[in-house]
Image (cartoon, helix red, strand yellow):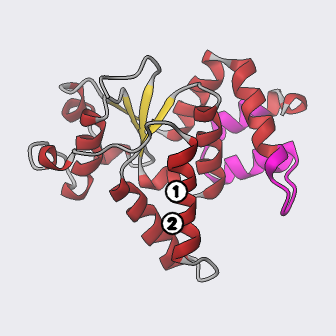
Amino acid sequence: MAGSSCYTAVLDACVLYPAPLRDLLLSLAREGLFHARWTNRIHDEWVRNLLANRSDLTESQLRRTCQLMNDAVPDSLIDRWEKLEGAVELPDADDRHVLAAAICGHADAIVTYNLDDFPAQALAQFGVEALHPDDFLLNQIDLAEIQALKAIKAMRARLRNPPVCGADLIVTLEKLQLPLSAARLKAAAELI
């Protein structure tokens, strides 16, 4: 891929781990608000961590989720990043693959809760920034409010087991450490 005309973000494993945030980010990407990307290694990381913490889930269920994600977002899977991994420096060597993927995937940002693992000075030379998911979501809503609210409403409507009302979604976002996005959606609760 030579790049995307859309703002491109690599989604770190930590933002794919919680299903509500994963669903929200993918819903916004499917609506065309940004180009979501990841690698098989990122998939492996969030799946491994989720399996370690949730005995009610199976690897085959989560691998099916990975495949559905790959199918839902065109050109989401980044490959050929491995050769670059050893050439980038980050505080935690285990995170170098995410930056390598961002570079190879022509990403503008890495969306992660772990901002300390992706210092601005290490990313700036590659034209990449690290964004907390709360800031990233708020930016998406601010840049295309109607589209974002439409995607969020459609996502919420798909949730049937159990059904989720707008107020429940807002509480979930607050629990996921997304207070700014939750507050913004609270102001537009009748639209989601």
Q: Quadrant of the N terminus?
A: top left
Q: Residue at x 68, y 47 (%)?
A: 173
Q: Amino acid at mark 1?
A: Gln
Q: Residue at x 22, y 42 (%)?
A: 100
Answer few, some or many: residues within 10 Å of disc 1's Cα (few below 14, many 20 plus, some between 14 and 19): few
**Residue reaching furthest left?**
87
Asked which secondary structure carries label 2, the reply is helix
Q: Which residues are magenta?
A: 157-185
**Residue reaching furthest bottom?**
55
- Position of 106 with respect to 149 (left or right) is left
Residue 22, position as x, y percentages in the image: 58, 50
Residue 79, position as x, y percentages in the image: 28, 45
Q: Which mark is residue 63?
A: 2
CA distance separating discs 2 and 1: 6 Å
Q: Is residue 10 above or below residue 35?
A: below
- Position of 7 with respect to 177 (left or right) is left
To which quarter of the image does residue 145 belong?
top right
Q: Which mark is residue 67?
A: 1
Asked if the magenta segment contains residue 173, the reply would be yes
Asked if the magenta segment contains residue 40, the reply would be no
Front one among 149 and 189: 149
